[in-house]
Image (spheres, rainbow, N blue to C red):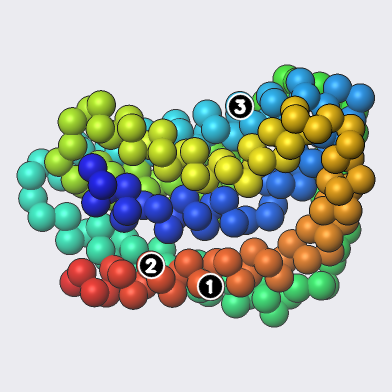
Amino acid sequence: MRDALASVLPLAIAIAASPFPIVPVIILLLTERPRVTAGAFLLGWVAGILGVVLCFSALAAVLEQGTTPTWASWLRVVLGSVLVVLGLRGWARRGSDTTPPGWMQALDDAGPGTALRLGLLLSAANPKVLLLAAAAGLSVGAVPLEPVEVVVVALAFTAVASVSVATPVLLHLVAGRRVSGALAATRTWLLANNAAVLAVVMVVIGLGLVAKGAGEL
């Protein structure tokens, strides 16, 4: 189980290091009902990632049937290469448009239901997060683990992948409105530097995945 967790940890870190989901949760924490709406967003985010990992773990377990999972190594190489290309593309386009999307601007009036659905969409339906979570699920499913162990690894993966979204929520629960100024400043910085930060994260994680996958072949 430790080996399975170690193999998917870089993927979880890649999701956690992405600044994109942090912006909406900070916006929700600056609304009139911060804890309810941000908590609903966090719940949707966690449910989306966990669901994807478990689904693809089950799929891999059906496909594997005891053979050596060489496809898992190729998957890392391919996924890593895609991340590097996307990261370089994002770096080249950084600063071209810092205007937040319309759905993000509409979050000021979002309720718990909207926040929950948004958390699900940004995790389970976001292509970059979906690819990383799916790759983790396939990797976990390729290892001979008991069902309970698969769930434990999936929960640990989700916890690491969600730490950047959960941290602002926990800080607000502890300190309340006292962290509003810091959250607002963080939101402004992330909106201005989101593309550059995400590009660097994707390139670094992508190169790591390529190296790991190539070393296993």
Residue 203 is tagged as 1
Q: Earlier in the sequence, mark 2 or mark 3?
A: 3
Residue at image coords 79%, 41%: 26
Q: Which amino acid lies under the numbered mark 3 shown in the image of this protein?
A: Leu
Q: Earlier in the sequence, mark 2 or mark 1?
A: 1
Contact, CB < 8 Å: mark 2 with mark 3? no
Residue at image coords 36%, 52%: 8
Q: Is residue 56 visible?
A: no
Q: Mark 3 sits on what residue?
A: 43
Residue 27, relative to residue 75: is it above or below?
above
Q: Earlier in the sequence, mark 3 or mark 1?
A: 3
Q: Nearer the viewer, residue 211 or 87?
A: 211
Left/right of residue 69 with respect to residue 205 in the rendered view: left
Report how far apart the C-alphas of labels 2 and 1 lie in the structure: 10 Å
Contact, CB < 8 Å: mark 3 with mark 1? no
Q: Mark 2 sits on what residue?
A: 209
Report how far apart the C-alphas of labels 2 and 3 lie in the structure: 28 Å
Q: Nearer the viewer, residue 100 or 168?
A: 168
Residue 117 is situated, as x and y percent measured from the top left of the image, at: 67, 27
Report how far apart the C-alphas of labels 3 and 1 lie in the structure: 29 Å
Residue 24, relative to residue 100: is it above or below?
above
Residue 93 is situated, as x and y percent measured from the top left of the image, at: 73, 75
Left/right of residue 42 with respect to residue 56 in the rendered view: right
Q: Quadrant of the C terminus?
A: bottom left
Determine the secondary structure under disc 1. Answer: helix
